Image (cartoon, helix red, strand yellow):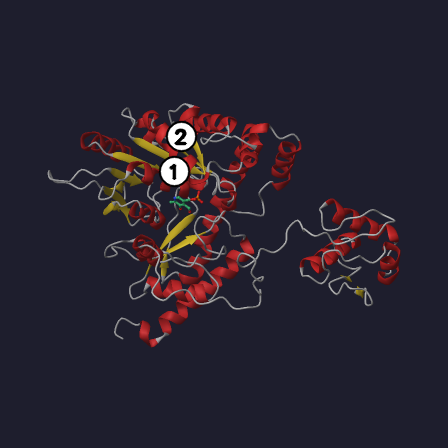
């Protein structure tokens, strides 16, 4: 039951003994609110602690603890015994609306913004391409398993770092990131991906998305030509466009980016690829293609952006060396992320810059947001060093391989004539081909309305879609959820096929 100090000048002071917040904190907040709202004026005397305690039905010590806190923070003055008063100047009074003017009434509605006001043309163009974020549920591509992450270990490492924070965790960390993390990533990339780099070339970013954005800002001047994969990762095209690039979508076939032929190709400034596992098609770029791409870039004087966002999840075949490691010419900017191997909310990723560009990347990194949270970086370095990350990746690789097979079984049992699914050797999603007459955009919208994410493949093309289908992420979907979502998807497809407007003749 809430208790109120009815006969006292403190209307905001209502106590709830069942609340999680202790009683002395409730009293503290109540009195503070009354003072800030002007219910108690400067110079006014607070009720005596004994009387207030009686009125509220709490011990005097509880009230004294609240008074002590208010006094320490400057909301009241005076000494115990002599009485407590509201001071003339409060620590965080609400600001005045104008010099000497009245306080703005928080209930007064704000005036509408001046008519015709617009953000920049560039911001408007980018916003047109942005879609409402999909929900983190089945079958969102790229969603990792979250429940099985070793949070106990992660929390212990974070707490250990917080207990004795180094000074540079608190102030003055470098723009490139935590030295131990840069070292750990360089070591991991050398052994797992054949990337050749010094720790000083590794720059820690707020996820791969920031690494894409930084690369665009460092390399692109307005009007520069950039080749992107068709179909491809839309947020990459968006940041290149924001930097002023002119995009040329280049088709992807079964071996990866198919280099345009012909002698008169205007040389691109940048070629952006995801060779380990192309997004969204899932193709792994063949070795001859990798070598041909490097050769082309050398002759054209182009940079290559290698987006290696989920290469850790490979279920068959040996991984091919990263383009960065095959490149003698230092024209590859390599990037990766912890979003898939840990969780996206961590917002930690990295890029490996060619040595001559490191200073430019660092200067821009410092301008944008200085550096990511130092404590999280240090805990991550420990997490890698102590073998937790490698163990988690091994367990998830096994699990995701099983889930991929299960998804194929579930959907083939329910939708054999409508969807075609083949096992993929890498990644966290499958591309389901659709039977003739099924429109992937409409199906995707209907699936979302029914509670299942299944992005349409045709939406990843900038030009006319060469192929349609649905992207189905399986990594973060447990068995029960997978069965439930497969049934929903099957119902959506079946009702779509039986609706008269869906037939090709309609
Ligand atoms: C192809 C590709 N690149 C980059 C990213 C960016 O990942 P993040 O910014 O979460 O590290 C993603 C995320 O889904 C992706 O799919």
Residues under labels 1 and 2: Cα distance? 10 Å
Lower sequence index among marks 1 and 2: 2
Q: To which residue does mark 1 refer? A: 308
Quadrant (top left/top right/bottom left/bottom right) for the C terminus: bottom left
Quarter occupied by residue 285: top left
Which residue shows up at 33% across the image and 65% down it? 116
Residue 78 picture location, percent across and down: 80, 48
Q: Nearer the viewer, residue 30 or 324?
A: 30
- Work out whether residue 309 can be spotted: no
Q: Is disc 1 surrounded by few (<14), some (14 to 19) or many (20+) residues within 10 Å? A: many
Residue 18 picture location, percent across and down: 78, 60
Which mark, by number, is residue 55?
A: none
Asked whether, in this view, residue 432 is left or right of residue 344, the answer is left
Q: Nearer the viewer, residue 244 or 409?
A: 244
**Residue 470 sits above or below residue 331 on the image:** below
Q: Nearer the viewer, residue 122 or 505?
A: 122
Mark toward the viewer: 1 or 2: 1
Asked whether, in this view, residue 333 is left or right of residue 92, the answer is left
Q: Quadrant of ligand 1?
A: top left
Which residue shows up at 26% across the image and 39% down it? 271
Determine if the C-beta at disc 2 is less than 8 A from ligand 1: no
Which residue ends up furthest to the left in the rendered image? 263
Which mark, by number, is residue 193?
A: 2
Element under disc 1: loop
Residue 111 picture location, percent across and down: 46, 67
């Amino acid at each position: 039951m809430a208790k109120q100090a009815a006969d006292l000048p403190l209307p905001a002071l209502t106590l709830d003994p069942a609340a999680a917040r202790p009683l002395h904190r409730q009293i503290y907040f109540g009195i503070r609110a009354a003072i800030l709202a002007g219910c108690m004026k400067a110079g006014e005397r607070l009720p005596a602690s004994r009387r207030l305690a009686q009125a509220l039905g709490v011990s005097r010590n509880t009230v004294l603890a609240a008074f002590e806190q208010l006094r320490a923070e400057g909301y009241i003055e005076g000494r115990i015994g002599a009485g407590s008063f509201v001071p003339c100047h409060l620590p965080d009074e609400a600001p005045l609306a104008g010099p000497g003017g009245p306080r703005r009434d928080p209930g007064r509605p704000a005036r509408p913004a001046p008519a015709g006001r617009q953000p920049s043309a560039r911001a408007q163009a980018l916003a047109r391409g942005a879609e409402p974020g999909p929900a983190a549920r089945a079958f969102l591509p790229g969603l990792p398993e979250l429940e099985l992450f070793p949070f106990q270990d992660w929390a212990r490492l974070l707490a250990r770092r917080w207990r004795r924070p180094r000074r540079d965790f608190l102030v003055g960390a470098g723009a490139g990131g935590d030295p131990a993390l840069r070292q750990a990533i360089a070591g991991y990339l050398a052994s797992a991906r054949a990337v050749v780099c010094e720790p000083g070339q590794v720059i820690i970013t707020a996820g791969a998305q920031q690494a894409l954005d930084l690369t665009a800002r460092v390399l692109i001047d307005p009007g520069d030509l950039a080749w992107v994969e068709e179909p491809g990762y839309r947020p990459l095209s968006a940041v290149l466009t924001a930097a002023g690039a002119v995009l040329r979508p280049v088709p992807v076939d079964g071996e990866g980016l198919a280099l345009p032929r012909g002698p008169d190709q205007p040389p691109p400034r940048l070629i952006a690829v995801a060779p380990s596992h192309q997004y969204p098609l899932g193709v792994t770029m063949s070795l001859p293609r990798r070598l041909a791409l490097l050769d082309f870039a050398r002759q054209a004087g182009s940079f290559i952006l290698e987006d290696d966002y989920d290469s850790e999840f490979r279920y068959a075949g040996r991984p091919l060396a990263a383009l960065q490691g095959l490149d003698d010419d230092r024209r590859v900017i390599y990037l990766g992320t912890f979003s898939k191997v840990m969780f996206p909310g961590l917002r930690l990723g990295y890029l490996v810059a060619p040595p001559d560009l490191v200073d430019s990347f660092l200067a821009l990194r410092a301008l944008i947001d200085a550096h990511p949270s130092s404590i999280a970086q240090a805990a991550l370095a420990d997490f890698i060093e102590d073998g937790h990350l490698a163990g988690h990746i091994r367990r998830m690789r096994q699990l995701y391989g099983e889930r991929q097979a299960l998804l194929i079984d579930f959907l083939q049992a329910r939708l054999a004539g409508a969807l075609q699914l083949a096992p993929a050797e890498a990644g966290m999603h499958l591309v389901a081909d659709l039977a003739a007459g099924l429109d992937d955009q409409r199906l995707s919208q209907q699936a979302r309305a029914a509670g299942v994410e299944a992005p349409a493949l045709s939406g990843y093309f900038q030009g006319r879609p060469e192929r349609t289908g649905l992207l189905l992420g399986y990594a973060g979907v447990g068995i029960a959820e997978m069965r439930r979502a497969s049934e929903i998807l099957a119902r959506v497809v079946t009702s779509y096929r039986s609706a008269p407007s869906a037939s090709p003749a309609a």
